[in-house]
Image: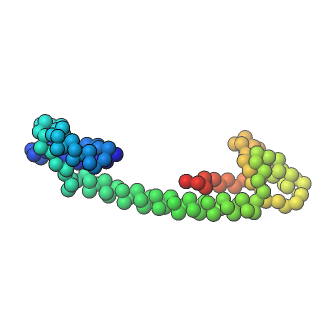
Amino acid sequence: MIKYNLICKNRHEFESWFSHSKEFDKLNKKKLLKCIYCDSNKINKSIMSPSIMQSKKSLNLNSTTNQELYKTKLELLKLRNFVEKNFKFVGNQLANKIREVYYNDSKKNNFYGTTTKEEEKELKEEGIDLVSIPWVEKNN
Ligand SMILES: [Zn+2]
């Protein structure tokens, strides 16, 4: 889909969507395009319209935001890779495993997994603080 800002011979400006750029030319040649204000079929693309300027500006803003998000995501991915390499995944057994280490002073293993909010609260009450990290998807 492509959006064009159109202008009629009476300088009315409006927007219209087309499936591709050729569709505009095709419809315009057949005089099927009409101004939404005065029904004139003398329509042209309005290239210097202020709304295009504006959308360019917000596009830049968005790409800055996207870059920041992308950087943050890369950092989180690095963190995820680090955790996956150095920690053992114990799934939803995390709370039990942590208690094993905490109370029995067993082998100091690094592991990671998932806890429910409930388990997290219980552990906190027992004096065990968990660090949770945002887990980002690798493929997108
Ligand atoms: Zn018009």
Question: Is residue 86 placed above or below 44 in the rendered structure?
Answer: below
Taking the image as drawn, is residue 127 in sight? Answer: no
- Residue located 13% across and 36% down the image: 39
Residue 17 coordinates in the image, percent (x, y): 29, 43
Residue nearest the observer in this picture, 138 or 55: 138
Q: Position of residue 115 (x, y in %)?
A: 73, 45
Q: Quadrant of the N terminus?
A: top left
**In this view of the protein, which residue sits in the foreground, 21 or 90?**
21
In the depicted structure, whether residue 99 falls above or below residue 40: below
Is residue 6 visible in the rendered image? The answer is yes
Look at the image and tell me in which quarter the C terminus lies.
bottom right
Q: Nearer the viewer, residue 122 or 54?
A: 54
Position in image of residue 132 (x %, y %): 67, 53
The x and y percentages for residue 49 are 21, 53
Q: Is 118 displayed left or right of 66 in the figure?
A: right
Q: Residue at x 84, y 54 (%)?
A: 102
